[in-house]
Amino acid sequence: MPLPDTQAELAASFTKFLTVAIHQIIYLRSVYPRVTFLPVRAYDFPLRQSRHPKVCEYIRDVVAAVETEILKGTVAAAYVIVTSISSNQPMERFAFDLSEFPRVAEEDLCTTFEERGLATALSAVDMEAQFRACLSRLTSACERLAPLPADDEFGFTVCIEVREDALPPAGTTKAEANWIIADPGRVNLQSRSAPSSLSKAKDGKQQQQQPSPRIPSEKAKTVPVRRVEAGELRFEVWVEEARQKFENPPGS
Amino acid sequence: MAADYKRFLAENVINEHRIVTYRLLSRALKVHCTLAKQMLYEFYRSENAKRLQSVHATYLITGIQWPMEEPANQTNDSRNGEDEVMQSSPFMSSMPQPDDAEPSVRTTSMILVREEDMPKARATFKSILSIHIYSLQSTVLQDLNVLTDVGREMRVTYGHEDPLEYGKQCGITQNKNVMRRSGSWQPPPRPASRAAQEAPPKLGAVKQGSKREPSLESKKGKEGEPADTRSASQQSTSRSLAKPTGKNVPSKREKSDLFKSFAKAKPRQVKQESNAPAASEEESAKEGEFPLFEFIFDDDDNDEDASEEREDLFLDTGERKNSKNTESRREREEKLKKMMEDDDDEMPDVSTAPDGPQDESPPPPPPEKQAELKEEITSHGGRRRGRRQVMKKKTIKDEEGYLVTIQEPMWESFSEDEPVPPPKKKPAISVPAAKGKKTGQGNIKSFFSKK
C-alpha cells in the first residue's frame, strides 16, 4: 500500500486498521458466536471477519463516522467497548489513543506532509509490519484477559473521546446526528479527560439512561497492547478491564 | 547448547509472548528439526512442572484415523471448534458414498491440535504413528490460524538462506540428486551462431532486417577485427543467403547436432535460447549505436511467443546485462567471442575453427537455395518492391514428439531501398523479406538505419 503522506490518507489507513481491529476484537471476545466469523487475511496476518451483514454494515458506518471526526481533528481517542447486555455495564474497553495524531486544517487535508527529517524514511512495508505486530499483540493480549462471563450476552459500541478544545459533533444535520452523548456510567471506565464522551448509537437506538455515581476509577486492569508509529501515524492501543467484570455477577 | 535453547524459549515464549514452532526453533538455533521438537517438549515439561499452565502447546498427530462414518460428526473432533463453519453441504456432497463405492484408501492424516483438544483428537485415530509438539506459546491459543504468522516470520528472517546448505542441518527432506549449478551460465556459441541465422525469421522485429541491410555496408569495413571474425562469419553467412531460410540449411545441420547434445533438454528451449542471443548478438555486432536492449524488448513485444523466450532465463539475463552496460560495440563483440570460446559443449567444428567451416558451409547452400526460390521484383523510384518466394521455417512436432523444423517456400512481399547489394554475401534483403509482411515497414527501417 502506498505511504500515507496526506492527512486524508493517514485517516484512511487508520480507519481501515480500525475496521480490521474491531472485527478481530469482537471475534476474540466472542461477542457474537465464533462460527459467524470468516478467516481472512489482512496486512498478511490471519484475522477474522464477521459474516453477518448487519454487523459489517454497522462497523463500516461507525468507522466512517470516526474518520469524519478524525479529519475534523476532534478525536482524542477511540474506544471499542464491550458491554454486558443484561447489566448494561461496560466490561472491557479497547482504547486507541489518537492524541498524537496530526491535526490539520481542513484546507490542508490533501496536502502532503513536510519531510520532518526524523525517522520518516518509512516504507510501506514498515507500516504494514507495524499494523501486523499490533494485531498480533492484540490477539495475545486478549488471551491474557480474564474470560468474559460465559452466561451473558454482550454487545459492543464504539466511542470517541473529543479533545478539550474541539467542538463535539452535535448538530441537526443527519450526518452530525450520528453521535449521541454517552452517559458516563456506561462508558467511563477511566475518563481520560472530559467527563462527557460520545458514543454511537447502535442501530440508531437511544442508549438507556442509567443514573450512576461517578466512580473514580472503575478499571481494574490495563493490558497494554502496542504503540504504533509509522511515520506520521502514531497511536497507542491498550485494553482495560472494568472492575464490574470481576465484581458483578450477571443479572445484578 | 542445552542452556541456549532454554534461554531462547524463555525469552520468546514467556517474556515476549511469541509463538515458537519447532521449525522456527531449528532455524534460529541451527539445529535439526527433530532435536528442536525434543527441546520444545523438554521446555514444556520443565516449565509446567515449575508452574502449571505457564506454557501451552499444540501438537501434531500423525496417524490413521478411523474411517469417517458421518462426515458431519467427524469434522469437529480433531479441529478447533471454530471451523464448524466448514461443515456445510459442500462437504457432504463431496463425499457422496463414503465407503461403499470403493475399498477405502489408507489415508495417513496429520492433524494439528491444541493441547486442550488432545484427548478428543487422539480418540479419532485408529493408530497413531507419531505425536510431537508443533509449537509453544504462553497463552491458550484460541485461533490456530495465528500459527501461519510464524511461518511468515520465518520466511522473512530465514528465507534468504540457501536451502541446500542449511537443509541438512535443519533436517529438510531433500532429493540427493539435486545439485545447484555453479558459476554463471554461459550461452553456448553454437546456438548463438545458429540463432544468428534463425533470428530473422523467428523474431518479428522487422526493424532488424532492413536495419541490417544498409548497416551491413557500413559495417563491412569494420570487419577486419579479430573480434569480429566470428560475428563476421555470421554476418557473412547471413549475408550470403538471399533468403533467410538459406541460413537455415547450415543452421539446420548445426541445429541437429545441437539437439543431439541437448537431447535431454527441451529442443524448443534451445531454439529459443539461440534466438535471443542471436538477435542480440547480431544487433550488437552490427549496430553499435543502436542500444541492444531495445531490440530485446521489442522482440518481446512483437513476438507472440515472447513468453517462450522469457522462459529462457539464462540467456535473457545475460543479454540484458550486456545491454544495460551499454558497452561499446567492440567490447560487446569481444565478450561474445570470449563467451563462445569458453563454452565446452560446442561442436568442435564450430568452436575451434569458427571461420573456416562456417564460411564454407553456408555459401554453397545459399546459392543453391537462392536458385530455387523465385522472386517477382519490381523496382522503381529507388525502391525494390515485389513478392518473393521465401523459404520459411516451420517447427512442428512429429509423431514421436520431436520438434522438427522444416522449410517451406512461401510468398512474401517485401520492399526495400535501392541499391540492393547484389552479391550473395548480403542477404540482408532476405531478412526483411522473411519478416516483412508489410511494405510500409521498410520506410521505418530506413529511418532507423540512417543512424
Image (tube, coloured by chain):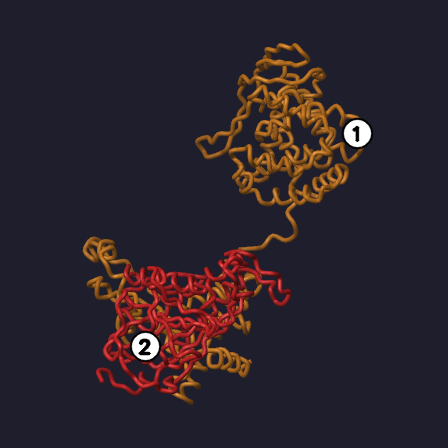
Chain colours: A red, B orange
**Foreground: disc 2 or disc 1:** 2
**Vertical position of residue B252 compared to residue B8: above or below:** above
Q: Nearer the viewer, residue B109 or B206?
A: B206
Q: Which residue is mark 1?
A: B222
Q: What residue type is disc 1 on?
A: Lys
Q: Which quadrant does the C terminus of chain B fall into? A: top right
Q: Which residue is mark 2?
A: A183
C-alpha gap between disc 2 and disc 1: 92 Å
Label 2: chain? A
Q: How far from the left and from the top, in percent, is residue B411? A: 54, 17
Q: Which quadrant does the N terminus of chain B fall into? A: bottom right
Numbered circles on residues, count: 2
Q: Is residue B127 left or right of residue A102?
A: left
Q: Is residue A49 left or right of residue B391?
A: left
Q: Nearer the viewer, residue A140 or A1?
A: A1
**Vertical position of residue A95 compared to residue B440: above or below:** below
**Vertical position of residue B24 compared to residue B243: above or below:** below
Instruction: Judge the density around disc 2: few (<14), some (14-19), many (≥20) Cα neighbours within 10 Å.
Output: some
In the structure shown, which secondary structural element does the residue marked by tag 1 occupy? Answer: helix
Q: Quadrant of residue B318?
A: top right
Q: Is residue A46 left or right of residue A108?
A: left
Residue sitting farthest toward the bottom: B50
In the structure shown, which secondary structural element does the residue marked by tag 2 occupy? Answer: loop
Q: How far from the left and from the top, in percent, is residue B55? A: 41, 81
Label 1: chain? B
**Vertical position of residue B207 compared to residue B74: above or below:** above
| Residue B130, visible in the rendered structure | no
Q: Nearer the viewer, residue A136 or B287?
A: A136
Residue at 63% from the left image edge and 67% from the top image edge: A118
Residue sitting farthest toward the front: A172
Instruction: Judge the density around disc 1: few (<14), some (14-19), many (≥20) Cα neighbours within 10 Å.
Output: few
Residue at 26% from the left image edge and 70% from the top image edge: A206
